[in-house]
Amino acid sequence: MLRVENLAVSYGRSQVLFDVSLAVEKGEFVTVIGANGAGKTTLMKAIMGLLRPFQGRIVFRGEDITARPPWYRAELGIGYVPEGRRVFPDLTVEENLRIGAWRRAASFKRSCERIFTIFPRLAERRHQLSKTLSGGEQQMLAIARALVLEPELLLVDEVSMGLMPLLVNRSFKVLRELNREGVTVLLVEQNARLALRAAHRGYVLETGRIVLSGPAAELSANEMVKKAYLGG
Amino acid sequence: MYEQVVAVNAGIFMLLAMSLNIITGFAGQPNLGHAAFFGIGAYTSALLVAKAKAGFWLALPAAGLVAGLTGMLLGLISVRVREDFLAVTTIGINFVLVAVFQYVPFFGASLGLVVPPATVFGRRLDTGGFLILLLVLNILVYLLCLRVRFSWLGLALGGIRNDEQATASLGYNVNRFKVFAFTIGTFIAGLAGSVYAHFMGFIMSTDFSFPVSVSIMAMAVLGGLGTISGPLLGAAILTLAPEIFRFVADYRMLVYGGLLVLMMRFLPQGLLGENSPLANLLERRRPGPAGRVAPGGGNRG
Ligand SMILES: Nc1ncnc2c1ncn2[C@@H]1O[C@H](COP(=O)(O)OP(=O)(O)OP(=O)(O)O)[C@@H](O)[C@H]1O
Ligand SMILES: [Mg+2]
């Protein structure tokens, strides 16, 4: 479904991604784990089209989208949950959802109902400004907002960041459920333990390079991964 | 008569503050050179009527169009530059334009331009006539703002103001919306310029200089950027204050500039912005459940 080939990205003169290649098949839950500053967010932004790579290709459902703008990629079926629960702070919960339904006014009611069954808390808070939500609720809203477009591939940039463990677990559960319902998921995560438990396959990103990849269970058992990412 | 002149002035600045609010309040794009577009409208209208012998009713929309097209160009630039550069760019545009009006003989240079009066059915439009025209224009622009605010467009602009990248990732061609906000906002400023030119009967470059841009910004900020009624209130207060308080008239730029700084520090959401003391007071008086009821409306204006 998604193929990233030899991707290289730099900010000005400092190169952040080097020759990154990965693939995500339809229905898969794939994770890219990496430490702080490894380039995870950069990778997600490049796939979404928010950053321009200087080398490499991005192919989605057979179409080369490397030069396509972000809105075009969204229309093709790529959803994006940005890092740090970036919801629209001075829009209400409902507006945060409605904004994604621009070209989908007809199906908005249905997708809203689906979203509210997954996230009942958001239904209770639908008229509240989203900046008044708790951190966990904002994370849910960020995921929900991307779901309004009914994406085939969901890019998720860290669900664990700054959340208490209970909420982190719940976020992972939601992603697994969505995946079971047929949404393909590509998650970049610092919390390797949970990410590898949730995903089918994984990649290890180290200072901008993919150094390891394989089935999640294999990666969890790998000595190097254990030492560097799973705390021994 | 004097009151009517003050009211015309207020009406013109209400249009300007509302139009700047579309660009800076709704879409979140800095524009510190709004007076340039006011000026483009004024000179376009004046030249069309004086040199091309066009009627005022043709010159008025033409002034809006020329200003709006220039604004569209600015919008196209704005999508290429970072926000802080954009603020500087708009100031630059203001200075360049004033210089052009000031030195090019075609625009009357430093002598200014005498503007033929506006006529309706052969009769000269008097102050009362201008007041009615301004009332109509203000109502139309106000309705437009309401319309924009509570539509997809308003939602998209709100998204862009909050987080451009996230908005783009939701399928919005962010650039197109920004350019649209600049075009509409500057079009309205052009209309205001046309009315101003024919009402005053004489224009010169300094009428549209950078301090005027600062005044317009002060009005929008005082009332509340992003609100619906705020810019009207801000423009009313700041056009009436110099008439009532002598010191405001004497130190106009100091007062407006100082006010801008103070507002940004202590009440950035403006008088009618969310959670401001005045907005809360109005909100409490309104019947119905607490909190936000209207989709996207609430106490934002
Ligand atoms: N806008 C930018 N300009 C310059 N350098 C940047 C920019 N954004 C990120 N970087 C640098 O690029 C590298 C990768 O950053 P990135 O945000 O992709 O890492 P990350 O893996 O997402 O980290 P984290 O786990 O902290 O979110 C870092 O060294 C960072 O300092
Ligand atoms: Mg990151």
Image: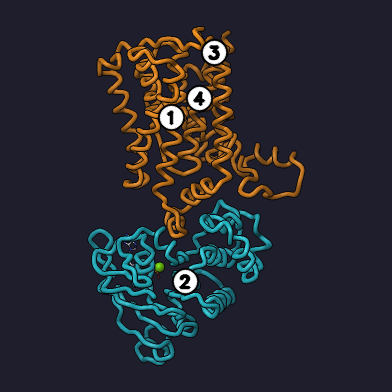
Chain colours: A cyan, B orange
Q: Nearer the viewer, mark 2 or mark 1?
A: 2
Image quadrant containing the N terminus of chain A:
bottom left
Q: Is residue A81 above or below residue B241?
A: below
Q: What is the C-alpha distance between the residues marked 1 and 3? A: 22 Å
Residue B274 lies, with reference to residue A93, above or below; the image says above
Name above or below for residue A207 compared with residue B40. Answer: below
Of the residues shown, which amino acid type is indicated by label 3? Val
- Find residue B116 and name its label: none
Q: Which residue is mark 1?
A: B214
Disc 3 packing (10 Å; few <14; some 14–19; many ≥20): some
Residue type at tag 2: Glu
**Residue visible at 39% across and 78% down?**
A24
**Which quarter of the figure has residue A39?**
bottom left
Q: Earlier in the sequence, mark 1 or mark 3?
A: 3
Location of mark 4 (residue)? B13
Real-space CA distance between mark 2 and mark 4, rounded to the nearest whole angstrom: 49 Å
Task: Give the chain of mark 3.
Answer: B
- Callout 1, which amino acid? Val
Q: In this rendering, do the residues under marks 2 and 1 share a single chain?
A: no
- Mark 3 Cβ and ligand 1 under 8 Å apart: no
Q: Chain of mark 4?
A: B
What kind of element bears circle 3? helix
Question: Which residue has dot 3 on it?
Answer: B5
Q: Nearer the viewer, residue B34 or A25?
A: A25
Q: Residue at x 46, y 44 (%)?
A: B28
Q: Earlier in the sequence, mark 3 or mark 4?
A: 3
Chain holding disc 2: A
Q: Quadrant of ligand 1?
A: bottom left
Please tell me if label 3 and label 2 are on a single chain. Answer: no
Going 44% across and 14% down the picture, which residue do you hit?
B198
Q: Quadrant of residue B282?
A: top right
Q: Earlier in the sequence, mark 4 or mark 1?
A: 4
